[in-house]
Amino acid sequence: MCAYVLAISMACLAAAAPDAPMHQGELIFPLEDWHNHGSCIVECPNGDLLVCWFHGTGERQADDVVIRGARKVKGAAAWSEPFLMADTPDFPDTNCCMIIDPQERLWLLWPTILANTWESALMKYKISTNYMQQDGPPEWDMMYVLHPKPGDAFPEVVARKTDEYLASIQIPEEVAEEVEAWKAHNLEQAGDKLTRRLGWFTRAHPYILDDGRMLVGLYSDGFSFSLVAITDNWGETWSFSEPIVGGGNIQPSFARRRDGTLVTYMRDNGPPPKRILVSESKDRGETWSLVQDHPTLSNPGAGLEIMTLRDGDWVVIYNDLPEGRHSLAVSLSDDEGTTWKWTRHLERVEEGTGRFHYPSIIEGSDGNLHCTYSYFEDGGDKRSRSIKYATFNKAWLKQGDPQ
């Protein structure tokens, strides 16, 4: 009886013990000279992992750029060979993202670049119900164009929110003239119907609310600010939030507080010093607060993602230095982003030897975090590029960097 009780006690203690720190990483495909960038990862309902990214000889300026993908079948030791996800012949296809909706349909969203400028981006999306096969790409059921149509009040809202933002910051006298020129340019663009309807595109995961509303974060390099595409009926119709106007806030990614407040963290595309930029919405993404610098998180003006974990903690994955993309960190908050108590680095090298950027992160059904990011090794005239996958748990993150 004593031995039995001891065995049960030991089993209970083992079950209650925290997970041992775990981290694994691997390249999805061997390093190559081709430009591979802007990945996004999802977990399929059967436990497979699916990743997309754009691939070609360049970005917006290269007409051979396509969307590629790869799959890691649950339990498999290696990733599949890359396969084609989307291609508009003789046009660049870039900045892709994915999500799986509650109906277990896969969405792929991306822009086709019409005239080799970001301002000519045309948003598209595909939906698939057959994407969990062992080999090859998803079978797409349909493809649509997502036509951004900001409301008629867009010019007035841009003007008001621009003034509110400029009133909230200190503008050095030596750049005051430049700021006024930026403001005038944005207001002129906002007044042009074609300009405000073209050039919006994706970067980070969309976000689905509990009631089924899907938010797709969009941004414009022409305006250098963001807005949100909203659908309450899975793409039958779309509406658009008011613009999220700041000093170069792009590529929105979303988390949600327990009280329902949505928070977006954005890349800083404005002048230095650069920080992660933040805004909030209390009406399910319709309107957004004044854009502000994050008080503690540095960023060199590079892509990032934030997410709410199932237990309510928040995770952000980002380049954490004010300059350079040679350091990629992941931070954890247990107070909904008020503080970030734990940080660990996925990559950190000497500047000029590598870049690790445009990360994508999810929480898997196994409770671990899974991420992908652009992995560039730089040396001399040679550039070697791939997409890297890493998985780790909170215990590894909380352990911190080795001393």
Image: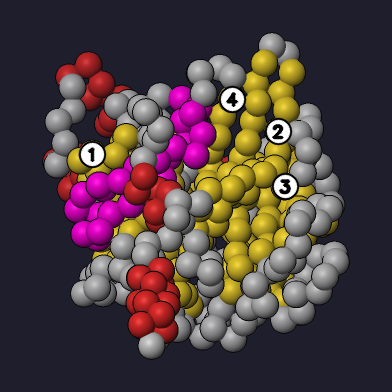
Q: Earlier in the sequence, mark 4 or mark 2?
A: 4
Please name the amino acid that badge 3 sits on: Ile
Please name the amino acid that badge 1 sits on: Thr
61 versus 161 height, above or below: above
Disc 4 from disc 2: Cα separation:
10 Å
Residue at horizontal 53%, vertical 69%?
Answer: 366
Task: Find residue 354 and name its label.
Answer: 4
Q: Residues within 10 Å of mark 1 (few under 14, many from 20)?
A: few
Q: Residues within 10 Å of mark 2 (few under 14, many from 20)?
A: many
Task: Find residue 385 and name its label.
Answer: 2
Q: Coloring scheme of the render?
A: secondary structure
Q: Quadrant of residue 402?
A: top left
**Marks 4 and 3: in contact by CB < 8 Å?**
no
Please name the amino acid that badge 2 sits on: Arg
Q: Earlier in the sequence, mark 3 or mark 4?
A: 3
| Residue 14, image x, y percentages | 41, 69
Q: Secondary structure at mark 4?
A: strand
Q: Which residue is mark 1?
A: 296
Residue at horizontal 51%, vertical 34%?
Answer: 347
112 versus 240 height, above or below: above
Residue at horizontal 65%, vertical 21%?
Answer: 378
| Residue 29, image x, y percentages | 77, 44
Disc 3 from disc 1: Cα separation:
33 Å
Q: Is residue 320 in sight in this rendering?
A: yes
Disc 3 from disc 4: Cα separation:
17 Å
Q: Quadrant of residue 318?
A: top left
Q: Secondary structure at mark 3?
A: loop
Image quarter where the C terminus lies is top left
